[in-house]
Image (cartoon, rainbow, N blue to C red):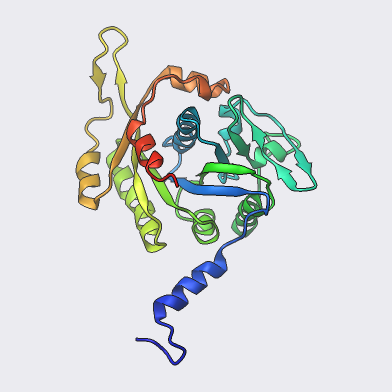
Amino acid sequence: MANGHGKKPEDFKKQMEDNFKVKPSEHSHIKKVIGIVSGKGGVGKSLVTGLSAVYMNKKGYKCAIMDADITGPSIPKMFGIGQAKNADETGLLPADSKNGIKVMSLNMLMDNETDPVIWRGPVIAGIVKQFWSDVNWGDVDYMFVDMPPGTGDVPLTVFQSLPVDGIIVVSTPQELVNMIVEKAVNMATMMNIPVLGIVENMSYMSCPHCGEMINIFGDSGLDSYAASKGIDVLGRLPLDPKIAGLCDSGKIEDIEENYLDSLVYVLDAMKE
């Protein structure tokens, strides 16, 4: 039912949502924003964020990563990026990885990267907004936002303030995680953010002698869970010391295997 001004309730809802949006820097031209989320920590969310950018970069897209995991940043280390306090008259400047992926993380701006960030939620959420509004990202086809685990202030801020085009949920095979994943999925649904799919990390390991795939945590039931929610499974990452070693040494871009073909296909289909 419309009111006297001819507006429907959903029109006001959209107007309120638009009012929450933060404008990017006038020097930033970002086509797609993809959030990488998880219901709990330690499931490999940053790994999936990094690999998503690496794989799309290899396809020729201009990619960027906003590290919104303010209190637990790991993206700079994965890409071998140290302190990088770069700025000019246009604003803060992201660092460039070896292959040209743009990265912004609070760790790059700290005097000592091991200093803890002891800030309350609203302050951290404000930093995330500034990463969007005050950083000169330039031309970006896909920005990947590495969000902190859970459904707290920062994920809410990202969903409300940034024009998120979709999220990728990261999980592991443990049964408990399915329940926690559902919280992240439900939050995105409540915020009208499309769930592009789920990536399962630590899904299996390959026998070094015969190559047999071993489900060391057992059957996760991910396929049945995803089917019940109408969500696609976009890939499974192995538990592989080689991957961990390359990430720890800042060489994530040297990972040659493409474990996320379906994810790349879905993202590629979103291009304008």
Q: Which residue is drawn at 69% across and 34% down?
A: 113
Q: Where is residue 84 in the image (x, y as percent from the top left)?
A: 72, 34
Image-quadrant location for residue 256: top left
Residue at the top extreme, as displayed? 209
Whether 20 is drawn above or below 143: the answer is: below
143 or 272, nearer to the observer: 272
Q: Residue at x 37, y 24 (%)?
A: 239
Residue at the right extreme, as displayed? 89
175 or 20, nearer to the observer: 20
Residue 39, visible in the rendered structure: no
Q: Where is residue 233 in the image (x, y as percent from the top left)?
A: 29, 39
Q: Which residue is drawn at 31% across and 21% down?
A: 205
206 or 4, nearer to the observer: 4
Residue 126 located left or right of residue 227: right
Residue at the front extreme, as displayed? 272
Image-quadrant location for residue 105: top right
Residue 215 located left or right of residue 109: left
Image quadrant containing the N terminus: bottom left
Q: Where is residue 97 in the image (x, y as percent from the top left)?
A: 61, 28
Image-quadrant location for residue 43: top left
Q: Residue at x 56, y 34 (%)?
A: 75
Q: Position of residue 106 (x, y in %)?
A: 66, 42
Residue 1, visible in the rendered structure: yes
How many marks can you see? 0
Residue 226 located left or right of residue 265: left
